[in-house]
Amino acid sequence: MEFTIKNAEEKDVDQLKPLMLQYIVDFYQRPKPDEKDLEELILSLMHNPSVGKQLLAVENDRLIGFSTLYFTFSTTRVKKVAILNDLFITQKWRGKGIGESLFRKSEQQAREMGCANMSWQTAVDNVKAQSLYRKMGGVDANEQWIHYELNL
């Protein structure tokens, strides 16, 4: 089993959309987004790398995972910061080091963008992901911050 990690390109859109739908609908049980909107998001990141980027795990020209980074700014750090919004590996390929590789490549991309830090969240019941994130050096920031959300 050999895989590579690469930046998403326009030729990947047709494979990336169903993978993202699997992540959104099947894994997180969210409503299915409009596929045109999803494609616009993917293309927007490709054309605006200062806003964010997607990294892909590829095995024999087939996408088996992805991560999504968004870049924003921190007033308190007076620097750019990265948000690892998504990290998803298809079921068959989990436990084979792909998540770790995607994470490390995302971390590298954030460093190259001059980010002060990279932050992320995971579901409380996603114990496997929590284990991976601790292994990668992640620290539970809930002791410092309370997360709020307002649906618009």
Image: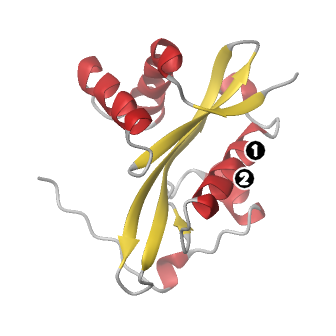
The type of residue carrying mark 2 is Arg
Residue labelled with disc 2 = 104
Residue 86 placed where, x, y %? Answer: 50, 45
Residue 147 location, quadrant: bottom left
Residue 106 placed where, x, y %? Answer: 63, 51
Do the numbered discs 2 and 1 sit on residues whose CB atoms are within 8 Å? yes
Tally of numbered discs: 2
Residue 117 placed where, x, y %? Answer: 56, 71
Task: Tell me the SS state at disc 1.
Answer: helix
Can residue 98 be seen from the camera position used here? yes
Task: Tell me the SS state at disc 2.
Answer: helix
- Residue 42 position (above or below residue 50): above
Q: Residue at x 62, y 59 (%)?
A: 112
Q: Quadrant of the N terminus?
A: top right
As drawn, the residue found furthest toward the right would be 1
Q: Residues within 10 Å of mark 1 (few under 14, many from 20)?
A: some
Label 2, label 1: how far apart the Cα atoms are: 5 Å
Where residue 130 is drawn, which disc sits there? none
Q: Residue at x 68, y 56 (%)?
A: 108
Residue 26 placed where, x, y %? Answer: 45, 27
As drawn, the residue found furthest toward the left would be 152
Where residue 101 is drawn, which disc sits there? 1
The type of residue carrying mark 1 is Ser
| In front of the other: 145 or 118 | 118
Q: Residue at x 32, y 27 (%)?
A: 38
Can residue 32 be seen from the camera position used here? no
- Residue 123 position (above or below residue 39): below
| In front of the other: 96 or 4 | 4
- Residue 136 position (above or below residue 102): below
